[in-house]
Image (cartoon, rainbow, N blue to C red):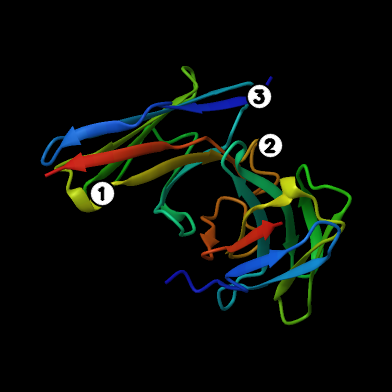
Amino acid sequence: DSGVTQTPKHLITATGQRVTLRCSPRSGDLSVYWYQQSLDQGLQFLIQYYNGEERAKGNILERFSAQQFPDLHSELNLSSLELGDSALYFCASSGGDGVNQPQHFGDGTRLSIL
Amino acid sequence: SQKIEQNSEALNIQEGKTATLTCNYTNYSPAYLQWYRQDPGRGPVFLLLIRENEKEKRKERLKVTFDTTLKQSLFHITASQPADSATYLCALSPYGGATNKLIFGTGTLLAVQP
């Protein structure tokens, strides 16, 4: 058990809809990361938050946004969903600002767009 | 372009043998490199981190080498067991430690036959 909790485990919705994925990091970890994993693209970095502030950004679509709250949990919001957004979305956390630190992953949210 | 390449095909070995997985990168100058294990339907699990000034790192049956001249890391599992069967991912932070954003390789599927 990594200590990182993601909810929900599965999400099925339709094109054009909006969903929110939730992540609780390991106790004491200040950094939270979001990744997308699809069969054709592998594991892709989306965004990092450190202690409530955005720290780094990857190829995150404008339709996607995230935030980290004062209690350090994070949410990833996906809107105007398209079929191609179907993927596994992972949250990870690490200590401090994360530099030179391993990342601890949750078991993901599987998003299916019908 | 920037790339991280791992053994593109699955690696099949006999129980008790040493498995060697490769990770080659181009156009990056990472301060450190990490290896993760991923089982089907689960999040990646951190295994080892090696810094650019370390040539080799060991943990139990695992050994990682890092050659910044060749731009290559090798990951070895000695005395392999069927329980070692999984996908192994290498990952690096592309900006020399300024951020912990991780870029992942596509992974190598290891199958250890009893």
Give the alpha-carbon distance from disc 3 to disc 2, as whole Å: 12 Å
Q: Chain for mark 3?
A: B
Q: Nearer the viewer, mark 2 or mark 1?
A: 1
Mark 1, residues whose alpha carbon is within 10 Å: few (<14), some, or many (≥20)?
A: some
Q: Chain for mark 2?
A: B
Residue type at mark 1 is Asp
Q: Please tell me whether mark 2 sits on a helix, a strand or a loop.
A: loop
Q: Circle 3 sits on which residue?
A: B2
| First in sequence: mark 3 vs mark 1 | 3
| First in sequence: mark 2 vs mark 1 | 1
Q: Position of residue A89 (x, y in %)?
A: 63, 57
| First in sequence: mark 3 vs mark 2 | 3
Residue A92 seen: no
Q: Is residue A31 left or right of residue B59?
A: right
Residue type at mark 3 is Gln
Q: Nearer the viewer, mark 3 or mark 2?
A: 3
Q: Circle 1 sits on which residue?
A: B84
Q: Position of residue B16 (x, y in %)?
A: 10, 41
Total numbered badges shown on the rendered structure: 3
Q: Circle 2 sits on which residue?
A: B95
Q: Chain for mark 1?
A: B
**Is B19 rendered above or below residue A84?**
above
Q: Please tell me whether mark 1 sits on a helix, a strand or a loop.
A: helix
Mark 3 touching mark 1, by CB under 8 A? no
Give the alpha-carbon distance from disc 2 to disc 1, as whole Å: 31 Å
Residue A98 seen: yes
